Amino acid sequence: MSKSLDKLVPELEVLKKIISAQDETIETIRTENDKRLEVLRSENNELITEHNSLLEQLRLALKREFGRSCEASPGQHDLFDAAETEQDRDFDTDVTEAASEPAANDAPNRKKPGRKPLPAHLPRIEVVFELDEASAHCAEDGSALKVVGEEVTEQSAITPAKISVLRKIRKTYACPTCESVQRAPKLADLLPKSRASAELLAHIAIHKYQDGLPLYRQQKMFERLGVTLDRTTMANWMVAVGQKLKPLIDQMRIDALAAEVLHADETTVQVLKEPDRRPDQKSYMWVQSTGTGPPMVIYHYAPGRSGEVVDHLFGDYRGTLVTDGYAAYQRLAHASHAGCWAHARRKFHDALQVQKGQRTGKAQVGFNFIQRLFVLERQWANLSTEQRLEQRQLIAQPLIDDLAQWLEKSLPLITPKSQLGRAMIYLHKQWDKLTVFLQSGNVPIHNNQAENKIRPFVIGRKNWMFNDSVKGAESSAAIYSLIETAKANDLAPDMYLRWLFNTLPNADTTSSKALRALLPYGVDPDMIVQSLADKALSD
């Protein structure tokens, strides 16, 4: 019996090793399976996150395409009425405290609908209706009727456009004794040897750059007036005009850099014929707008969106630059960089748009905080700089502190790729720039001014789609600059351009003083009106 056991011992040891190896193999397989399962779970979570993100983007795109564009949130008419003194309140549930202005239909002094009188400055042409001689007698006794009153009705009237030929006749004089010859002096033209007068050039520029009317449509309009004016010719005129305006734009850029506050933004533009670039590549139109001092709006074309363009436009600017947070502006080491709360609010609004059902939670809370800030700023719009700064530090600073506390608490709990995550991450990264306004009464809380100034170009771009050449894009930038700066200074752009195009050819473009006297913020509006009136009489 013992001998049999002795024979079994080695076999038992072998079996133990086999079982141990199998256990190790099973454990390895289990470990590998656990790792694979963890990877699959991670990948599944990423796919779910990506799926949710794509769904949010789809819902947001549908909202933007078919929904209302107003950045309003429902139930805001009585929001933020309660005093905010509880520092440890639950921000996530306190969603009833938001901010907004009263709706339009709640306005206490809402004007009743009705016809407004026609502007008093328009000339009146009277058409008088009277009884004829036969009817101006009483039907009963034949007595002559007397005028005892009148009924006046006013209608808007317009004189259709007409084209005339401006003949500039320059007399030549000769001495009968010595036969010397002398010609009468002649003022220079904006485009020498061109058949286009200053008035026609201004007319084409206003229609294209202010009214968004492409040149091919203007060509059709001229044809209806009996004039053949090719759009290629008009395009060449506009390019030449833009080049003539360069000294004015250069002077305006120098003056703008002296402003304490500047706004900046950029948008895409397509240029078909640009060296070493495909026709479908994006180029950019940049805009600078002064926030303090004389109102100026300056457009600049560039093939890219790089930091070199920022260096060219702003140099060593040392004021406060308000932007949407684009990183290239950070190259300006001497400038103070202010952020845009409108961009931050828009991102929270997008997060609200993609939510299903009732708008609640962190997206609503973040939106409410920012909306409250806008309401306060509207209330302080007419205050002096010192008074606005005082209100900001007294009222806005505690609101910003509460928002910072809520952001710090909520940021770790959100999904970064969601619309809410993007909104909160933007707010977190831009925080230092967004809070610059608390230290100044001059700095606005948003960059809407630059966005509003670039909008006319965007609207025009929808009509004429692209520029043919770089010179065309640069000329467009110059003409847009003067039109928008004229509007910012309450000048009628058509009158200003007509006057400028007549005056510029005979001005000293090497003198900063002379150039400033031609720019919208340096010219006397009454002088423009008088000058145009005198020219009309002389013609």
Image (cartoon, grey):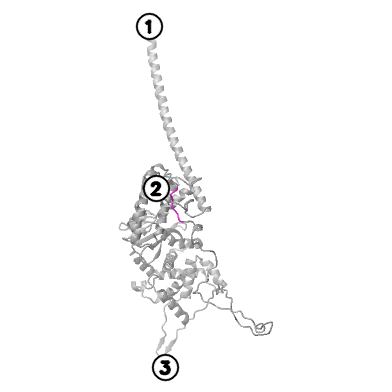
Q: Earlier in the sequence, mark 2 or mark 3?
A: 3
Q: How far apart are marks 2 and 3 (CA)?
A: 88 Å
| Callout 2 touching callout 3 (CB < 8 Å) | no
Q: Distance between the residues labelled 2 and 1?
A: 78 Å
Q: Quadrant of residue 170?
A: bottom left
Which label sits on residue 176?
3
Q: Is residue 413 visible?
A: yes
Q: Which of marks 2 and 1 is nearer the N terminus?
A: 1
Q: In the image, what residue type sits under mark 1?
A: Ser
Residue on which the image places disc 2: 425
Q: In this view, does 532 lie above or below 358?
A: below
Q: In which quarter of the image is residue 484?
A: bottom left
SS at mark 1? helix
Residue on which the image places disc 1: 2
Q: How crowded is mark 3: few (under 14 residues within 10 Å), some or many (20 or more)?
A: few
Residue 334 x/y as whole percent: 30, 58
Residue 413 x/y as whole percent: 40, 42
Q: Is residue 277 visible?
A: no
